[in-house]
């Protein structure tokens, strides 16, 4: 049988992805020069938005690999190299988040209100006691140590799991499971670490954009968004690879399971979204409701659209058994929901940044109006930047896929995966 | 599920492994043997398409029961709190939709679950006090069974069944009279 074990990153795909990355770079540059508030907020918020989104996808693939190893799951083994390739994007994530961190130190951006020294100074007339109170966590030093540190820890665990996975390919004795046993230990240790650090990273990188606000559910909600996005990208990448003649053993049984994850975690995301919303709505505490007040008053299309695109659409389309087993519906739902969660992140980041930039601008120019093009609704530049980042992510993972055989033939669960039935 | 007042004479073979069973069922289909029924202790993936069974419509009833639950809960609460007995809770409006969501969700699940169980039991002819004939108690434990009806079979057919069981590796072959 002619099985394609090694992936060749063909020139045509490379060209297409490079062109799209170029387009993204041009849009990113253009958003830098579209600078009505004087702080390049459009550029920096787009940069943060997309960096966070794709770093999270890389984290979730590593996390899910660890979950599967710990749970003795075997169904995914035939395509686990794809998730290993996603996980390696953590290296790029570390660099991207490093750039944001450098920006915090240099005051290059006003993404985070807590970086404003005057707000922390009790003698200043814009002294902000809430930010002062939170400054033990929300300060540049903690942002750097915890943010970069946590990303580095994820990368360490990913590289260990990858190393053991590759070692299994090369073993000479088929009954030698020593590498797998080691990966089980690393995977099990990673689960609680990933659980706590992902929450910490989300608080620092994302929730602190709205520095006055907090929600204990926010980290899970964002994590669910990342997870669903990761499943969408997985489905799309696998279907692409199959269309190019790779992964002939990945069949509709595997896609059915991925479709179930997409369906179930879309519901899980909605559950968390609603739990956070309803408790805040019911509690009616001003410092909590401000987050939603801002979004329903000023971003109603994004706010309600978020639920339609990320819950109603995948729920009704994927509810049936057969839509999870059809290429067409899987591609449609994956594309829409991937975009939907990018939109969800837009809504998490932009209103807070607008607020911060607006306050900073108002301090400098008494009561001046701040234009919010590309901030209150995604513009063409935002779409272009998303496509550019997505192309960059894909370029990276396809080039990583060439580095190892596509099928992990030494994995103890490979036979289970090849004969998988749902 | 027919209700004949006669009895059927059944010849059945027991298999110890589900893959042997799947191969045997496929062979019976290929040889055009008329299978009376196949019994397994748990759902065997891939068996339904070989047997040519139509997709169950139970999930459609599940959707309908679920929808009924959604409407019962949502319309019920809406009527109670806006028409029948309006009460203000915690300064919320008379029609506090977000508060209704959890109960609406729960009644959806409850209606779908109970409705599907009752439907399934009814359609399968199961229920309290009803006993169904069983060929062999081990098919509820660890044996996989293919059964042929030999009530009206000729000797030639019965020989075909027996050689079929032998060829496909059945661990034992028995026959039994059961009420139809």
Image (spheres, coloured by chain):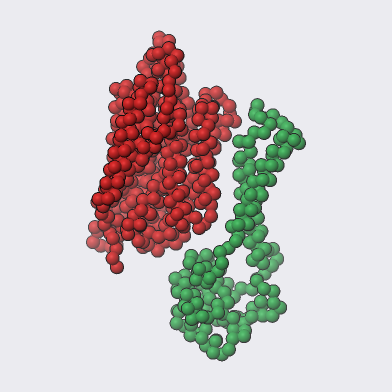
Chain colours: A red, B green
Q: Is residue B18 visible?
A: yes
Tell me the residue at 26%/57% (across/down).
A6
Tell me the residue at 54%/44% (across/down).
A312
- Picture quarter containing residue A417? bottom left
Question: Residue A29, how many percent across, how many down?
Answer: 31, 31
Residues A200 and A308: in front is: A308
Question: Residue A103, how many percent across, how many down?
Answer: 31, 26
- Picture quarter containing residue B105? top right
Q: Is residue A209 above or below residue B11?
A: above
Q: Is residue A198 left or right of residue B77?
A: left
Q: Is residue A190 visible?
A: no
Tell me the residue at 71%/35% (across/down).
B81
The C terminus of chain B sits in image quarter:
bottom right
Q: Residue furthest bottom?
A: B155
User: How many marks overall?
Assistant: 0
The N terminus of chain B sits in image quarter:
bottom right
Residues A7 and B158: in front is: A7
Residues B134 and A76: in front is: A76
Q: Is residue B161 above or below residue A342?
A: below
Question: Residue A143, how many percent across, how many down?
Answer: 34, 28
Tell me the residue at 29%/22% (across/down).
A106
Q: Residue furthest right?
A: B84
Q: Is residue B91 left or right of residue A419?
A: right
Residues A98 and A229: in front is: A229
Question: Residue B44, how many percent across, how many down?
Answer: 50, 66
């Amino acid at each position: 049988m002619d099985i394609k074990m090694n992936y060749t990153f063909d020139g045509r795909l490379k060209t297409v992805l490079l062109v799209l990355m170029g387009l993204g770079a041009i849009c990113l540059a253009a958003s830098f020069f579209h600078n009505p508030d004087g702080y390049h907020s459009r550029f920096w918020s787009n940069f943060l938005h997309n960096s966070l989104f794709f770093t999270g996808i890389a984290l979730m693939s590593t996390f899910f690999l660890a979950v599967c190893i710990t749970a003795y799951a075997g169904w995914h083994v035939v395509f686990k190299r794809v998730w290993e390739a996603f996980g390696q994007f953590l290296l790029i994530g570390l660099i991207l988040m490093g750039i944001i961190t450098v920006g915090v130190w240099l005051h290059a951006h006003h993404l985070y209100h807590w970086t404003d020294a005057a707000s922390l100074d009790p003698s200043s007339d814009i002294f902000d006691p809430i930010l002062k109170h939170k400054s033990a966590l929300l300060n540049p030093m903690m942002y750097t140590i915890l943010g970069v540190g946590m990303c580095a820890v994820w990368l360490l665990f990913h590289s260990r799991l990858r190393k053991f996975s590759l070692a299994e390919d090369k073993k000479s004795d088929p009954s030698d499971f020593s590498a797998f046993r080691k990966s089980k230990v690393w995977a099990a240790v990673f689960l609680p670490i990933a659980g706590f650090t992902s929450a910490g990273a989300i608080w620092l990188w994302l929730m602190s954009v709205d520095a006055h606000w907090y929600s204990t559910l926010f980290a899970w909600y964002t994590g669910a968004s990342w997870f669903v996005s990761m499943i969408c990208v997985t489905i799309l990448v696998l279907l692409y690879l199959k269309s190019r003649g790779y992964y002939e053993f990945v069949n509709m049984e595997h896609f059915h399971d991925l479709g179930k994850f997409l369906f179930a975690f879309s519901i899980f995301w909605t559950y968390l979204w609603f739990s956070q919303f309803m408790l805040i709505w019911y509690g009616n505490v001003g410092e909590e409701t401000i987050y939603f007040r801002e979004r329903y008053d000023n971003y109603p299309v994004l706010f309600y659209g978020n639920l339609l695109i990320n819950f109603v659409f995948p729920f009704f389309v994927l509810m049936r058994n057969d839509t999870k087993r059809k290429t067409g519906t899987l591609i449609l739902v994956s594309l829409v929901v991937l975009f939907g969660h990018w939109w969800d992140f837009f809504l998490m980041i932009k209103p807070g940044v607008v607020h911060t930039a607006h306050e900073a601008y108002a301090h400098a120019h008494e009561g001046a109006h701040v234009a919010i093009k590309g901030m209150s609704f995604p513009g063409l530049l935002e779409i272009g930047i998303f496509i550019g980042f997505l192309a960059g992510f894909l370029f990276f993972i396809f080039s990583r896929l060439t580095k190892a055989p596509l099928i992990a033939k030494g994995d103890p669960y490979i036979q289970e995966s090849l004969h998988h039935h749902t | 599920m027919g209700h004949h007042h006669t009895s059927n004479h059944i010849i059945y073979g027991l298999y110890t492994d589900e893959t042997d069973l799947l191969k045997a069922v496929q062979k019976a289909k290929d040889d055009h043997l008329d299978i009376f029924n196949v019994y397994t202790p748990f759902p065997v993936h891939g068996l339904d398409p070989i047997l040519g069974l139509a997709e169950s419509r139970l999930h459609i009833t599940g959707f309908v029961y679920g929808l009924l639950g959604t409407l019962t809960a949502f319309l019920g609460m809406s009527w109670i709190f806006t028409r029948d007995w309006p009460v203000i809770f915690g300064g919320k409006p008379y029609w506090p939709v977000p508060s209704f969501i959890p109960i609406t969700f729960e009644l959806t699940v409850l209606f779908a679950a109970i409705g599907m169980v009752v439907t399934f039991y009814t359609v399968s002819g199961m229920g309290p006090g009803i006993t169904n004939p069983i060929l062999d108690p081990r098919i509820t434990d660890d044996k996989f069974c293919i059964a042929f009806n030999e009530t009206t079979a000729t000797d030639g057919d019965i020989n075909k069944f027996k050689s079929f069981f032998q060829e496909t590796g059945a661990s034992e072959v028995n026959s039994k009279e059961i009420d139809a």
